């Protein structure tokens, strides 16, 4: 990807911030920090009641990106249909990998976590930490799917759930 101009993101745009998922740019403001004028994106994560200020010149570098294209969303959906790939590694190791995928901001990687940690009712119990990771990944996926398709999270959740359930059948 080429070095992007700062006009890539605009106020009201939905963006994906790797460590927090989907947020909305509310404004671009200037702040003086240690005598240096910095231009910052002010990003609201409404669901988490959190606001983040990100220097505009660092946004791309830290992996902030626009919402996935519908194309990527359908790739993520087909990833969900795949067979769970569970490595035989120790849980702590796997948990770390899942965590990295979730925080990578990469929708396909997030879908892989959802796929790998999804359990049907008749399958073995999930540990608390598995469940936490699964829910974090599911929420990231659902929020982005919702934002891409126009914002209805309930619909997006159902869409994701239908894919996971159909896979089990």
Image (tube, grey):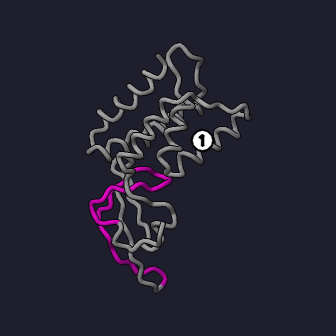
Residue at 32% x, 42% y is 146
Which of these two is toward me, 142 or 49? 142
Residue at 56% x, 27% y is 83
- The spot of residue 97 in percent (x, y) is 64, 43
Residue labelled with disc 1: 98
Which of these two is toward me, 113 or 166? 166
Examine the image and state in which quarter residue 9 appears: bottom left
- The spot of residue 130 in percent (x, y) is 58, 32
Q: Position of 86 compared to 43: left or right?
A: right
Examine the image and state in which quarter residue 15 appears: bottom left
Q: Position of 119 compared to 45: left or right?
A: right
Q: Secondary structure at mark 1?
A: helix
Which of these two is toward me, 111 or 130? 111
Examine the image and state in which quarter residue 86 appears: top right
Total labels drawn: 1
Query: Which residue range is magenta in the image?
Result: 9-34
- The spot of residue 30 in percent (x, y) is 35, 77
Where 115 falls versus 103 (above or below)? above
Residue at 58% x, 20% y is 125
Main secondary structure of the magenta stretch: strand
């Amino acid at each position: 990807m080429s070095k992007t101009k700062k006009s890539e993101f605009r106020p009201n745009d939905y963006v994906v911030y790797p460590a927090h998922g989907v947020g909305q740019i509310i404004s671009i403001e200037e702040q003086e920090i240690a005598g240096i004028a910095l231009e910052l994106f002010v990003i609201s994560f409404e669901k988490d009641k959190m606001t983040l200020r990100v220097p505009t010149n660092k946004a791309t570098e830290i992996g902030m990106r626009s919402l996935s294209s519908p194309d990527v969303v359908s790739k993520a959906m087909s990833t969900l249909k795949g067979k769970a790939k569970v490595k035989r590694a120790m849980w702590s190791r796997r948990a770390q990998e899942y965590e990295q995928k979730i925080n990578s901001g990469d929708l396909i990687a997030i879908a892989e976590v959802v796929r790998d940690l999804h359990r049907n009712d008749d399958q073995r119990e999930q540990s608390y930490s598995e469940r936490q990771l699964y829910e974090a990944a599911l929420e990231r996926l659902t929020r982005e799917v919702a934002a891409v398709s126009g914002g209805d999270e309930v619909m997006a959740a159902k869409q994701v759930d239908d894919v996971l359930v159909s896979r089990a059948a």
